[in-house]
Image (cartoon, rainbow, N blue to C red):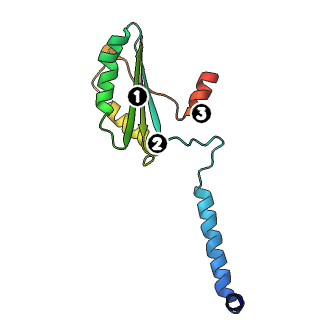
Amino acid sequence: MDRLVALAVNRRFLMVGMFVAVLIGGLIAFNQLNIEAYPDPTPPMVDIVTQSPGLSAEEIERYITIPIETQVAGLKNLTTIRTISLYGLSDIKLQFSFAYTYEEALQQVLNRLAQLAPLPGNVQPQISPLSPIGEIFRYRL
């Protein structure tokens, strides 16, 4: 221990240089740190909602849900697809691995939806809010 202290005292410029390097590295890491008020520990999830009033749940499943499922089924890093078809509503939840950020997953889904053939009644799929917190705010407000 005495040798380490003696080295630090004898080589002051080296110690000051190492201190400055660690300080600059810490500031850079702090600036790149993602700080949120409500952090989201879940993997990225994209929610596709399509409304088509007047169609039964079976028609929604056949004409809207299944074509969208088929279109997005081959996405990279897609881990889970969950769907629900109700009267006039199709809801498809796509969960991705942590290899993607939400923005990357959203861009992949939007690219696939742009290639989707026209759906009956010219309905357009829409993307739901960014995170579960956004969904809570949407339903709460």
Q: Amino acid at mark 2?
A: Glu
| Number of other residues with Cα within 10 Å of mark 3, as a class: few under 14, some 14 to 19, many 20 or more | few
Indicate left or right for 58 with 40 as reference.
Answer: left
Residue at horizontal 43 percent and vertical 36 percent from the top:
95
The answer to whether residue 44 is seen in the rendering is yes
Does label 3 or label 2 sit earlier along the sequence?
2
**Rendered image quadrant of residue 31:** bottom right
User: Front-most of 65 and 113?
Assistant: 65
Task: Tell me which label, 1 or 2, sits earlier in the chain.
Answer: 1
Amino acid at dot 1 = Arg
Q: Nearer the viewer, residue 122 or 96?
A: 96
> Could you say where residue 101 lies in the image, as x and y percent from the top left?
47, 45
Picture disc at residue 118:
none
* Element under disc 3: helix
Q: Which residue is labeled 3 in the image?
A: 133
User: Which residue bears the numbered disc 1?
Assistant: 82
- Quadrant housing residue 19: bottom right
The residue mark sitting in front, 1 or 2, is 1
Taking the spot 61% from the left edge, 75% from the top edge, the residue there is 21
Element at label 2 = helix
Disc sitting over residue 103 in the figure? 2
Vertical side of 82 occupied by 6: above or below: below
Name the spot of residue 139 as percent of width and height, x first: 60, 22
Would you identify the image quadrant in which residue 125 lies? top left
Q: Tell me the amino acid under the disc marked 3.
A: Ile
Residue 96 percent coordinates (x, y)? 42, 40
